[in-house]
Image (cartoon, coloured by chain):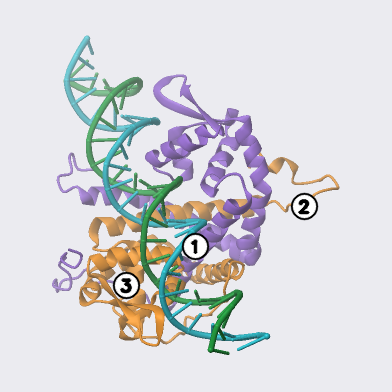
Chain colours: A orange, B purple, C green, D cyan
Amino acid sequence: MGATRTRERDDDGGGAEVRWLDEEQQWAWRRFLEGTSRFFEALGDAHDVGLPVTLGEYHLLVQLSEAPERTLRMSALAEFLALSRSRLTHTVDRMERRGLVVRNPVPGDRRGVNCVMTDAGYAALVDAAPGHVTAVRRLLVDALEPGEMAVLGRAMAKIAATAKGLDPAVELATDPAAPGARPAAE
Amino acid sequence: MGATRTRERDDDGGGAEVRWLDEEQQWAWRRFLEGTSRFFEALGDAHDVGLPVTLGEYHLLVQLSEAPERTLRMSALAEFLALSRSRLTHTVDRMERRGLVVRNPVPGDRRGVNCVMTDAGYAALVDAAPGHVTAVRRLLVDALEPGEMAVLGRAMAKIAATAKGLDPAVELATDPAAPGARPAAE
DNA sequence: CCAAGATAGTTGATGGATCAACTATCGTCA
DNA sequence: TGACGATAGTTGATCCATCAACTATCTTGG
């Protein structure tokens, strides 16, 4: 950065020290920025063009498809999808209007709301899955060496844990060896 | 609507089978999703809380700070930042209102518009840089081993290239009456 | 057993992102 | 030269994300 790189050495004695990024770090960081931006744009386009649900809606349906009874509490969904409660409310509003999910009360807790995938929601998921997975393959999995993909996964897990750790909340580690129901997704 | 869309799948005995993701691939893909989501949320928060410009504005200023005369054409900015022209127009509108940048005509091309960083824009960049870099360090660089960071950079470069090359093809698929038959567009 | 605070979820206003349509200029080829 | 398509950028409508404020319920310490 032209503005900031001029004084990476020899700082005046006072003030907070900033450890600037070296060339390689900066290069990697910028590739990260550009890559994520272009990747999600392209993946979103794939959904907009050929699939019945947006990318965000798709991930919501995937989570539901893997849950017992195809049901999850709003708060659990928000946690799994890393969404704010407000955003989830609005998203579920839209999906409920289209008949993809339904809201039910939670049996033991009258504050709670369960989000349940309807048959139409499941059908939309099944409909979208092949195009989605094909796009993820083209844009991510097949674009990398298997070894790179593995490192990427581990690195992103660390990044997720770090970012999560300094907002609220704690890490609930999942592993590639996690059991779980096998839905028709990915 | 929603579930009304039907695409022929699983009917062609010939081929076009979807190659689903295996366990490890799926795990890595989901870490990628979660990691990017949480990372950008946390980094955005860092800007909102303590810094005079948003993350997107910051990157725009960085690009300008590195350009000759602190000046770039709108189209060049859009390319570097991977933004649509429309989005860039609106973003520059807002920044111009705040005095961070100015629009000038491009000397040899009366269609063109140059975006120029003002002194106030430069000051905002200098002001924001330490907090920004510190956050990037905490959330990304220092969260990874140096080797992981290097692999991440290379992987993201490949992803960016792949997504970039693919974008035009999506547009082609949208238009059934494609005029003049695009030459495969990379 | 109740007051205080935590948790769950919604709401509505605001502002940013997206898309299609539009103006204007440029390049080129007949 | 001038018509046509490509390029550059803007506009405004619409949609989505974000935030603060709000209701309602649950939990806990005194």
Res B36 label: 1
Say whether residue A82 is left or right of residue A61.
right
Give coordinates of residue B47: x percent, y percent. Answer: 59, 51
Q: Is residue B167 above or below residue A92?
A: above
Question: How many other residues sit within 10 Å of disc 1, few (<14), some (14-19) or many (≥20)?
Answer: many
Q: Is residue A186 visible?
A: no
Q: Of label 2 and label 3, which has the lower sequence position?
A: 2
Q: Residue at x 57, y 71 (%)?
A: A161
Instruction: Locate residue B49, reporting x and y percent.
Output: 60, 53
Question: Residue B176, how many percent across, how many down?
Answer: 16, 48
Residue annotated with mark 3:
A61
The structure residue drawn at horizontal position 57% and vertical position 52%, both measured from the top left corner, is B48
Picture layout, residue B83 above or below residue C4: above
Task: Return the residue nearer the eye: D28 or B171.
Answer: D28
User: Please, what secondary structure does the residue beneath circle 2 have?
Assistant: loop
Chain holding disc 3? A
> In the rendered view, would you say B76 is above or below A26?
above
Secondary structure beneath label 3: helix
- Camera-side residue of B154 and B71: B71
Could you tell me how far apart the alpha carbons at marks 1 and 2 are, in whole angstroms? Answer: 27 Å
Question: In the picture, which quadrant includes the N terminus of chain A?
Answer: top right
